Amino acid sequence: LLPKCHLFHAVHQDSPFVPWRFKTKYILTIHDLNALSENKNPTFQKKYKENLQKKIDRAFIITYISFFTKKEVEAIFKTDNKKSFVIYNGISLPHTSTTPLLIPTSKYLFSIGTVVPKKNFHVLIKMMKHLPEYHLIIAGTLFHQYAKDMRQEIIDQALSERIHLIGTISDEEKHWYYEHATAFIFPSLLEGFGLPVAEAMSFGIPLFLSNKTSLPEIAGPEANYFSSFDDAIMATEFRNGMNAFNDKKKEALIERSKIFSWEKAANSYLELYKL
């Protein structure tokens, strides 16, 4: 049971804790509706929607981590004109890096995320056949069958020497990979925000992203967006984007990354706590 309090902030929509005492003010932060896209089971969908609707009904303020998520929620759930705010996540990377165990022997593209179907990493495998001068490093947990299938596909395509699924890494190693990468590549299909995109942006490296869900909102106009997941088209769009990249674009990416600050987020939430 929750202790008595004046205000309770659930920082994720799936939190099991809800203060049902009427006098306790309740702020609900919704990150995404990915669960509804990933699990189409009718029973799950019904229960998830009912549970989240109850939390929305109970909240006196709803916050979202992107305008995309806000629009998505308001299209499915009844929010009854409740006070709502978009407060972006912040970037929190160490100031120093650690040299990782795997150092590519040539230029490399970097990506990071749990290796599951929604991240869509498999489309990069055939794309890499068109980019023989590059390596590809994908960091992130490898527990899912999707990751095992990707490993086999990499072997089948004879790309084991150039595509590396390296598993989980430390923040300091992640810093190193961002710092030395030729570009960041992220073909994800479902993102409520897309934190790796904001992190990569802070290093001013070229971004190549899917044009799905929240990614265009977070990355802005200086990023490159794949128009298709056809491997030849992706490779062509990658080369075109690299040829067009310059110092002005680099500076614009770094400047945009400053929007995503935990200090700004904390101050925004503090203002809501005072309401």
Image (cartoon, rainbow, N blue to C red):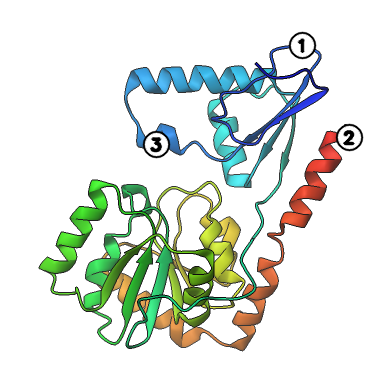
Quarter where residue 264 is shown: bottom right
Q: Amino acid at mark 3?
A: Ser
Depth check: give the residue in front, 52 or 170: 170
On the image, the x and y values in percent for residue 196 come to 52, 61
Secondary element at image label 3: helix
**Residue at x 66% of width, y 18% of height:** 57
State the mark number for residue 22. Answer: 1
On the image, the x and y values in percent for residue 139 come to 39, 63
Q: Label 1 vs label 2: CA separation?
A: 18 Å
- The reply to whether the C-beta atoms of the residues labelled 3 and 1 are less than 8 Å apart is no
State the mark number for residue 37. Answer: 3
Quarter where residue 148 is shown: bottom left
Residue with the most extreme left position: 156
Q: Amino acid at mark 1?
A: Phe
**Residue at x 35% of width, y 17% of height:** 43
Secondary element at image label 2: loop
Give whichever of discs 3 and 2 has the lower sequence position: 3
